[in-house]
Amino acid sequence: MKIPPVIASHARQFGTLLVFMVLCVVLTVLTPHFLTVSNLLNVAQQTSINAVIAVGLTYVIISAGIDLSVGSIVAFSGVVMAGALQAGWPVAAAVLTGLAVGTGCGIVNGLLIAFGRLPPFIATLGMMSVARGLGLLHTDGRPVSGFGDAFRWLANGEVVGVPVPVLIMLGVYAAAHFVLRRTKFGRYVFAIGGNEEASLLSGVPVAAYKVAVYAVSGLLAALGSVLLTARLNSAQPIAGINYELDAIAATVIGGTSLMGGQGSVIGTLIGALIMGVLRNGLNLLGVSSFFQQVVIGAVIIAAVLLDTVFKRQKR
Amino acid sequence: MKLPSTLWRAAGASLALLLAAGCGRTPETAAGADGRPTVALVVKTLNNPFFIDMQKGAEEAAKALNANLLVQAAEREVDVERQMQIVENLIQRKVSALLITPSGSREIVSAIVKANKAGIPVIILDTRADAAALTAAGGSVAAFIGSDNYEGGRIAGEHLVARMNGKATVAVLEGIPGHETGDARLRGFREALKAHPEMKIVVSQPANWERDLGYNVTQNLLQAHPGVNALFAASDLMALGATEAIAAAGKTGQIAVVGFDAIDEARAAIKSGAMAGSIAQSPAQMGRMGVEAAVKLLGGGTLTPEIAVPIELIK
């Protein structure tokens, strides 16, 4: 059978897309509540936070790194932003402060990894605890809640019927895809992940780009936090626990290789949507909460299994 | 390249998985399909005996009243965002009524407002939604069914005063900060101790309702305050963690531990002398009364806005 070149070159994403579509078809058959405009917008909205954070993880993982600190950065940047909002700062200033905090944490991660020569696992594991602790200290362990309508618009607003968080998610993906595929930055991220030594020898400023990659991850975690805080009308220092695992799962389901050098943000978007649709569908079906965890775990394993089987065949 | 067959296999696997999930689901009936109302119970988590008892009570009532019951929960008690997703998904499923034990008193407000907009009545069990935040958001609940936690805390305090003859060095394990249930218990407890100047609270720290944190926090506070001879934990899980830390320190019997909830394990610990008492709530009765109230409301009846569930001291 002849496979059109565009499909062959994006085979892994088409595989993910196929799984996603089969899922949707099955859910449509099983429940009348799945395929409705309001439910699809609902799922897209629920997926947006994980999807935005997962873009950062995709960059990091393509560069052959890992970032375990994003969940804690969600909490820390969230409470700092929330504090600023409650102190009466304009929305834009408070949001920018939150984003700056996230980016700052990411830069520290990057510096520790690029110049301190720490393994990414260790550096971001440390940051995971530090950022969580700073968030708890900042608020004395309490949630900060109750914001104005202008800020809440980021979660509850709509532009021509599409929820704002969904638009933000799509914007982030468009930009991230462009940067990864069409710019020097993107090519270098792939190069560093594919072969760091070779990149260094061919003149890629590896250290600087690594710092930038972790900064992007921190920035996007903080952006996820903006969406989360607006959605709940509350910033909690214990928010975002296990978000790093959800983001890694979305990235991996989307076909990005944990070994680095391979991957795509579009795959990650589909990966995040698969997780969102699964959780939504299992709720709609009234499946036991415990069984839901089994199913989601099985899908992660199946996706990676698909990846390895495919790679073996290609060889 | 054998790509398509791999893809189909993966798709088939996910299909089979979902069909399996479909078989394990509760029958799909929005109100009207078979004339039975569907009542959804969203608890904080199902890995806590308290909520499992609540589920059992609700199941009994649903059976007796011929209603469909759906029970859903997040994996983690602190995951307010996931709880919101579950509520949103159940709204999409068009359940007839929602019974919710909020994971976050303020964070649940947005979800309640969404249910209000969809015309689905909400009854709150066990943990109150923040009244001020709810009013500010323009939301409303049909009723609150739960224990008087302030009174429970007060009874626990008076029990400890009597037991220690009005003189003790007291440590307190708090729940998640900013959580209405825990705050009310602590207020009641402190109120009871106020009249007894020789009952001194030397340390009060959150252990987030978790058993392992109860253990760790107690271990640390025994290091810092070796003179502690009485301990109040705002839940039995934390109290049981504390008794294990006390046993590890070789101080069993020297520190009077009072918990809250009177779960089976705590009752056994009280019998063996490892705990000095606990406040019994009736989660099963909460679940039962919740379903009864929902069915009454759906049948056109009216509810008292506050329905108290009896509490008692177990010693």
Image (cartoon, coloured by chain):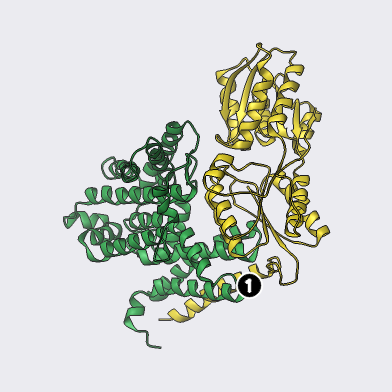
Taking B92 as reference, is A183 left or right? left
Rendering quarter of residue A75: top left
Rendering quarter of residue B273: top right
In front of the other: B226 or B285: B285
Find the residue positioned furthest to the right: B64
Mark 1 belongs to chain? B
Q: Residue at x 32, y 46 (%)?
A: A92
Q: Secondary structure at mark 1?
A: helix
Rendering quarter of residue A16: bottom left
Give the drawing colour for chain A.
green
Q: Residue at x 46, y 75 (%)?
A: A18
The answer to whether residue B100 is above or below residue B7 is: above
Q: Residue at x 41, y 58 (%)?
A: A165
* Visible residue check, residue A273: yes
In front of the other: B279 or B17: B279
Q: Residue at x 50, y 35 (%)?
A: A142
Question: What type is the residue that disc 1 sits on?
Answer: Leu
Crowdedness near tag 1: few (<14), some (14–19) or many (≥20) residues, C-alpha within 10 Å: some
In front of the other: A196 or A239: A239
Chain letter for the yellow part:
B
- If the image is split into quadrants, where does the C terminus of chain A sit? bottom left
In front of the other: A256 or A84: A84
The answer to whether residue B147 is above or below residue A170 is: above
- If the image is split into quadrants, where does the N terminus of chain A sit? bottom left
* Visible residue check, residue B245: no
Q: Where does the image place residue A70, in percent across and percent down from the top left?
A: 41, 47
Taking A111 as reference, is B98 left or right? right
